Amino acid sequence: MVADLLEGARQTGCQNTGTVDCAHCRTRFLSVCAGLDDADQAAMAALVDPRCYPERSRLFAEDEAADHVFSITEGVVRLAKLLPDGRRQILGFALPGDFLGLSLAVRHSFSAEAVTSVRACRIPRKSFIELTESRPHLLARLHEMTASELSHANEQIVILGRRNAEEKVACFLLTLRERWSVIEKRSVTVPLPMGRQDIADYLGLTIETVSRTISKMARDRLLLVVPDGVRLLDLPKLETLARG
Amino acid sequence: MVADLLEGARQTGCQNTGTVDCAHCRTRFLSVCAGLDDADQAAMAALVDPRCYPERSRLFAEDEAADHVFSITEGVVRLAKLLPDGRRQILGFALPGDFLGLSLAVRHSFSAEAVTSVRACRIPRKSFIELTESRPHLLARLHEMTASELSHANEQIVILGRRNAEEKVACFLLTLRERWSVIEKRSVTVPLPMGRQDIADYLGLTIETVSRTISKMARDRLLLVVPDGVRLLDLPKLETLARG
DNA sequence: CGTTGAGTTGACCATCGTCAACAGGAGTGG
DNA sequence: CCACTCCTGTTGACGATGGTCAACTCAACG
């Protein structure tokens, strides 16, 4: 099922012409839609434009006018900021159920690029803001999601500021496993659709250090490298590493 | 005036018995109160308990039940998370106008400690949440502030993940100068009420590296070390460093 | 079968951390 | 008033973690 969510858009040859069917949306109970009543739900559905983004395409760029907000329904998106000299920091990976544009700001403060083929519900930002103005529940839900994002960002700050390479990689793998498990059933196999360079730019490391660290973990029998992912073999030890 | 905001609580020998006088509050146009109408303002004022916290005292601890939210009116507060082995990451420094507890979560996800003597308006969390439920403007303001915090957290992630020691220190000093300038008039002298260890734990460095980096900047005539702060001498070069 | 791009591995090196010594100011007590 | 301690910050010597540069493997693709 994780594979479905990752690859569905590619398999179905998405045409950007789909009709919205929120009632059967897999992310209904994960996304911004969770906890909304039928009226809020319907009002949102009326605004939604379901779209597909091929692998490596860009949903939006850093500093670009934020004309739309997005709710990811399939695939993986990387969120990144660039320094003028080209150094890149990935802020996070958006999975099905994640919302882009929570801040409702006029400009995007980071770019969003499809790591896999992606499906997303796109909503004009202005219409969405108007909706929140008449529907306090929606605004409350949005605030809740923003607060949760802030909490994750704070945890990432601790990881970047105070952990070594091995701990960073362990945290990354365990957190990603946890996130997949919310979307689908829990598994010790963690799909890694993003490349090593993306992982490096997320953890504040180089691609070589990420590669070496994963190799060392495989040598130590903490995990097994499989095609497009890893299988976690020794969860207790990984969790000890991640705990610090 | 910056000195006033920093030291007012100490000077006046705060007794935790003050009455609320939001109309004359210095942070009225900075804090959560900014942009609220008189009714919202008055409703909030009715809930407020103005309190003082001496230097080094704790407003709340990590993982503690969040029975109150806080709006800082004077002084500096450090927000920190600890790893089980004692490593510390400071998430940020709260200045007058900053709000603690934006997420309205049941537990605090970090601790808050007074770096200087501090004054803060304390509000019971439950009452505050009830207030937001009847006053959408207040919730919107809260969401706006949370989104702004998230954006700052994302910038800090880039600093921690992709910048070297010198760039980190330059970013820190320039950002702090900018923040003071919103509270009081802009100055090239940046007060640093927090110790070197706090700066190190904020930037993901050691105290020695922070000390060496500042010494090097002083040697290079980028700044001058003054009692409890620095005077920025070469803003263009510092900004070039900070830009990356 | 050659090309391309991602990932891995090794050798070397730089940045920053560690450990230790020292300086200077604040507070304390004789 | 001075001696003493304590605490913070500074500086130096050394070392380890992770970065840099380069070579190589391997799978995908034409």
Image (cartoon, coloured by chain):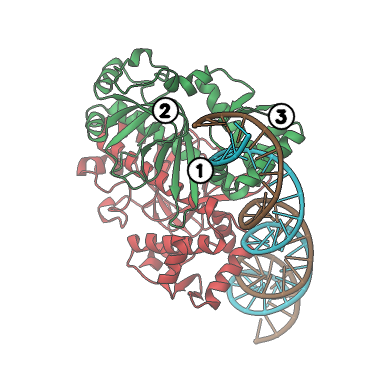
Chain colours: A green, B red, C cyan, D brown
Q: Are marks 3 and 1 on the same chain?
A: yes
**Disc on the earlier residue, 3 or 2:** 2
**Image quarter for residue B187?**
bottom left
Q: Type of residue at label 3?
A: Pro
> In the rendered image, which quarter contains the N terminus of chain B?
bottom left
Q: Are marks 2 and 1 on the same chain?
A: yes
Is residue B55 visible from the viewing direction of this image? yes
Marks 3 and 1, Cα distance to the nearest angstrom? 24 Å
Q: Position of residue B239 (x, y in %)?
A: 42, 66
Front-lying residue, B207 or D19: D19
Marks 3 and 2, Cα distance to the nearest angstrom? 33 Å
Q: Residues within 10 Å of mark 3 (few under 14, many from 20)?
A: few
A124 above or below A197? above
Q: Position of residue A160 (x, y in %)?
A: 57, 47
**Disc on the earlier residue, 3 or 1:** 1
B16 above or below A242? below
Which numbered marker is on residue A154? 1
- Tell us which disc is closer to us: 2 or 1: 2
Q: What residue did someone put label 3 on?
A: A236
Q: Residues within 10 Å of mark 2 (few under 14, many from 20)?
A: many
Q: Type of residue at label 1?
A: Asn
Front-lying residue, A111 or A35: A111
Secondary-structure class at tag 2 = strand
Residue under the image location 52 percent in, 39 percent down: B109
Q: Type of residue at label 2?
A: Val
Q: What residue did someone put label 2 on?
A: A118
**Disc on the earlier residue, 2 or 1:** 2
- Pointer 3 chain: A
Residue under the image location 34 percent in, 30 percent down: A140
